[in-house]
Image (spheres, rainbow, N blue to C red):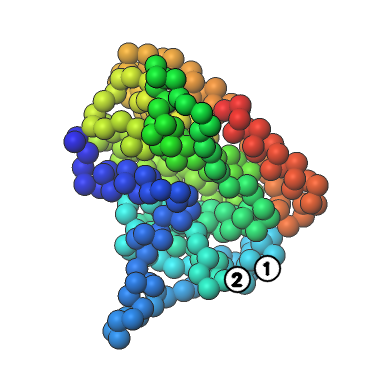
């Protein structure tokens, strides 16, 4: 109730059980389902050097020749891209409508790189019973983990490679976030990951998701998007100023760094992953 069809689809995708954001296309990518159709044509795969100069790709090591790009117009506008491995081939699956295709492609490549280096996956569970007066029931906790916590974990991963993408490939996440959040703000809606329904802009659950979205905007959005987000939150919630403060505090705990993964030692990588988990704990 209160959601457009596209917003509802976005919420439903985020509620898929035990499916990380990087695997969303498993439900909406049609290649394997259609492979028995005699008229089926597999999606075209393109090498990275269709989009980047060879000199740019040198920093990727073996991935520069392994990652294949698929432009998939079946992705919803709320999903700019995703990464998956199919028959041992790492794929970057990209929405053709994205404002900066180079950034989205490289963003998915970096997720492949972190996965190969052993970046921890996110898995949380509840032990014991949840207090009856807590806003975080067992169901709400599951939505909280698959929503705000997973968004923050993705944001922390981005914080370790966005500066390198900007330096080497001369592209940034701002245009993607601008498109995403302008769409939400124009509709007067922020995705709440199933934690609330309809235009409910009050209460703890909406406050938690709004603070999470603001942290994303602060780290990856333009100044215009940041100011529009702050205005929307302060006008929508009775404790809007406090929510803005929480969002700023979350963003401040996520440490951005410029890392060349190919040149890092095993110990440096271990320390980086430890620092990422620490960022998640304190944020």
The CA span between labels 2 and 1 is 7 Å
Q: Residues within 10 Å of mark 2 (few under 14, many from 20)?
A: some
State the residue position of label 1. 62
Split into 4 quadrants, where in the image is the C terminus?
top right
Residue at the spot x=26%, y=25% of the render? 200
Q: Is residue 253 left or right of residue 102?
A: right
Q: Residues within 10 Å of mark 1 (few under 14, many from 20)?
A: few
Residue 55: x percent and y percent? Answer: 66, 65
- In the displayed orientation, state which residue is furthest to the front: 128
Secondary structure under the numbered disc 1 in the rendered image: loop
Percent x, y of residue 215: 49, 30
In the image, residue 166 lies at what x, y percent?
A: 59, 48
Q: Quadrant of residue 130?
A: top left
Answer yes or no: do the residues labelled 2 and 1 have beta carbons within 8 Å?
yes
Q: Residue 219, how many percent across, how many down?
A: 53, 35
Rendered residue at 55%/43% (across/down) = 122
Q: Between residue 171 and residue 242, name the one nearer to us.
A: 242
Evaluate whether residue 156 shows in this view: yes
Name the residue located 32 percent from the left edge and 54 percent from the top edge.
Answer: 76
Report the residue that reaches farthest toward the left.
Answer: 1
When asked about the image quadrant of residue 60, the answer is bottom right
- Quadrant housing the N terminus: top left
Q: Could you tell me if residue 214 is visible in this image? A: no
Task: Out of 175 and 230, give the one closest to the viewer.
Answer: 230
Q: Residue furthest bottom?
A: 38
Among the 4 quarters of the image, the one containing residue 231: top left
Residue at image position (48%, 18%) is 245
* Total residue callouts: 2
Residue 66 disc label: 2
């Amino acid at each position: 109730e209160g959601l457009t069809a596209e917003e509802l689809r976005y919420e439903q995708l985020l509620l898929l059980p035990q499916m990380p954001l990087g695997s969303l296309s498993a439900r909406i990518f049609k290649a394997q389902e259609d492979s028995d159709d005699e008229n089926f044509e597999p999606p075209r795969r393109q090498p990275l050097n269709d989009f980047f100069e060879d000199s740019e790709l040198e920093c990727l090591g073996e991935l520069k020749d392994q990652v294949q790009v698929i432009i998939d117009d079946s992705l919803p506008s709320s999903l700019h891209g995703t990464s998956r491995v199919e028959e041992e081939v790492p794929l970057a699956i990209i929405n053709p409508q994205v404002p900066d295709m180079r950034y989205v492609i490289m963003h998915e490549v970096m997720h492949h790189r972190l996965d190969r280096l052993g970046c921890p996956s996110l898995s949380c569970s509840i032990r014991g019973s949840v207090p009856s007066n807590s806003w975080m029931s067992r169901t709400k906790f599951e939505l909280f983990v698959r929503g705000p916590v997973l968004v923050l974990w993705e944001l922390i991963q981005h914080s370790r490679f966005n500066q390198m993408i900007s330096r080497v490939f001369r592209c940034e996440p701002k245009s993607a976030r601008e498109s995403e959040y302008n769409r939400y703000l124009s509709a007067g809606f922020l995705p709440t990951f199933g934690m609330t329904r309809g235009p409910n802009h009050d209460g703890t659950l909406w406050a938690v998701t709004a603070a999470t979205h603001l942290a994303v905007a602060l780290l990856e959005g333009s100044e215009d998007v940041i100011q529009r987000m702050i205005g929307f939150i302060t006008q929508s919630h009775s404790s809007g100023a406090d929510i803005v403060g929480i969002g700023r505090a979350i963003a401040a705990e996520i440490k951005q760094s410029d890392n060349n993964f190919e040149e890092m030692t095993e110990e440096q990588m271990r320390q980086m992953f430890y620092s990422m988990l620490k960022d998640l704990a304190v944020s």
